[in-house]
Amino acid sequence: MKSFSKKLLAGTAVATVVLVGSIGTLVAQEKPVIATVVKISGIPWFDRMNTGVVAYQEANPDVVATQSGPATADSAQQLQIVNDLVAKGVNALAVVPMDPAVLEGTFQRAMERGIIVVTHEADNQVNTNADVEAFDNADYGAALNERLAECMGKEGKWTTFVGSLGSRTHLQWVGAGEENAKKYVGMELVDPNNESFDDANGTYEKAKEILRKHPDIKGFQTSAGNDVLGVGRAIDEAGLSGKVCLVGTGLPNPSADLLESGAITAIGFWDPQKAGMAMNAVAKLLLEKKEVTAGMDLGVAGYNKVSVKQGAGKGLLILGNGMVLADKATYKEHLF
Amino acid sequence: MQKPGGQLTMLLVINSALLVAGALISGGSFLSVFNLQSMASQVPEIGLLAIGVMLAMCAGNGGIDLSGIALANLSGVLSAVIVSSFLSTADSGTAFSLAFIAGALVIGLAGGVINGLLISRLNITPILCTLGTQMAFMGLAVVVSGGKAVMVGSPALLSGIGNDMIAEVPISFLIFVLAASVVAALVKFTPFGLWLMLMGTNPKAAVYAGFPKNGVIVATYAMSGVLSGIAGIIVAARNVNVKFDYGSSYLLIAILIAVMAGVKPEGGYGRVVCVVLSAIALQLMSSLLNFSGLSNFVRDFAWGALLLTFLAIGRYDIAGFLSPDRRSQNPSVPVPQAPK
């Protein structure tokens, strides 16, 4: 009998940990569930989005809104989460795809099961009911680059960072940036599209390499939320604050020190909190079988008068007007 | 000869415990047919890679295959690029599917043979060799695809592999089980299997005994490569697209699965059925955590805890207590006993 009890003990030890840990989250749910899935959890950008999902939940007690995301930046991990949520039987998915292409198959299966799919940062997603974008991506990329060109005096070497070569929006931004820079003959793009994997440390190392390789570089245009931190730190440590320009997507709070020191020239962003709320708002509208029309107010700041286009597939492409460019003088108006 | 060992019992207990825990937590929906199918169709990718890692580990002498997922992606990407250059998904779906599958298998095999040749002929340490080929395979996939996802599309045959069921079991899972059975049979019933395990136990003795050492190593890594190729086909069939950086986290998970399955990292012992069960256990745990809405960081923690539990079990031979009459299942390696 002793060996039998040992068997039980060892076999269920780990499962028990899991069981005890999750009992609190168990409620039989009658209300429609909108599950938000982000690219990666635990980074400031998507933590901010989570505050939006929480706020949406508080404002809309008639739905259940939750957010989850993989612990590592890997499209396969995100895919598994979406698969499991589909199997669990959520009513709507609000996904920020790590890689839209990888999720197509699963979204197709989800929609066949009657699940509403809303995406964000994926205007090429074919299998989605609606893709919500904070703004027109080309406008945003051009605006970032215009700010960079202004700081660089419209001449000199510059380079670009993207989260990964699979991040379509990032490539659109730097693409639009490159287009914009063609206006200025003095601007020379070197080693473009460095992959940062949204990792500030990796970006820091890469930026140091670039600063060594091109001692005369004048500008960086970055894309993922953590890139300005990594590149900014490299510029700061090299004593180049104010001499090398850095404009990229970033959040005000984490960037505050580097904005103050002058290592970051300006940050551009849209509020992921509002984007999270807008995705959930669209998901709820679609769950209620209502239509999203041009000029509609989603009830979220920056999405008060959305424009609606035909998306890459059968779904809609919903564009808000939530672009913000902030520098040392103005970032304090948007602290988050 | 080998009876079901303690590790197998442990894995069965853990799998059942996870299923019960899932049923309790979800109020039954965890055991719904749809979720079981969903989980079954998620296992094959990582399970196939883990079997590859197991084979490499069994070969001993620090054997490991780090290039698995990179080769799987390369198989999918390169095969898709080549095949779509002369066939189109829309016009000739079946021909495209068959050519794609054949292409992926051949590329997987070729990659595996390259690994095997480098390790056996040039005597490169496996961990360094496969680290190098991993980067080479990934780099090649980036070059041929230009860093973008490559569209495979969903011709009937491939879409069937990715989405359809036979007798309510996903076809991809059946392929996984079939591949695992073939490998298990090769290891158990052929001279190759005996050579592999004995060579892993004592490479020097194997050389003096006149084993075809190079042949065995090449065959081992070639098998691992073919398994990667199959994984690449399943990824393509399920996701419609293939991409060079898919599953970058799979590398360590595949090793975790192999170690959890009781494969000896120093070589000479490993059972395919344990690897399959171990892969299923990880899938169950991961789906369970997603079901209960816990953070994915908890999943990493839980996997680590599971791995440590298994290592502790191996170290103190708890499994031996469970089934005392089967304690001598692996006489070649002395199992440390807990002090009395």
Image: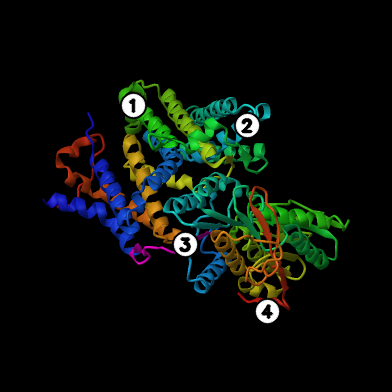
Q: Can residue B264 be seen here?
A: no
Residue pointed to by mark 3: A32
* Left or right of B26, for residue B321: left
**Do the residues marked 4 and 2 share a common chain?**
no
Chain letter for mark 4: A
Q: CA distance from mark 4 to mark 2?
A: 52 Å
Question: Amino acid under label 2?
Answer: Thr
User: In the rendering, at what x and y percent does residue B67 appear?
Assistant: 51, 39
* Quadrant of the rendered image containing residue A301: bottom right
Q: CA distance from mark 1 to mark 3?
A: 49 Å
Question: Amino acid under label 3?
Answer: Pro
* Residue drawn at the location 25% of the way across and 34% of the way down: B332
* Quadrant of the rendered image containing residue B11: top left
Residue pointed to by mark 1: B185
> Which element is circle 1 on?
helix
Question: Amino acid under label 1?
Answer: Ala
> Which element is circle 4 on?
helix
* Range of residues picked out in magenta: A22-37
Label 4, residues with CA under 10 Å away: few <14, some 14-19, many ≥20: few
Residue pointed to by mark 2: B89
**Do the residues marked 4 and 1 share a common chain?**
no
Chain letter for mark 2: B
* Residue drawn at the location 30% of the way across and 47% of the way down: B15
* Quarter of the rendering occupied by the C terminus of chain A: bottom right
Q: Are marks 4 and 1 in contact (CB under 8 Å)?
A: no
Q: CA distance from mark 4 to mark 1?
A: 67 Å
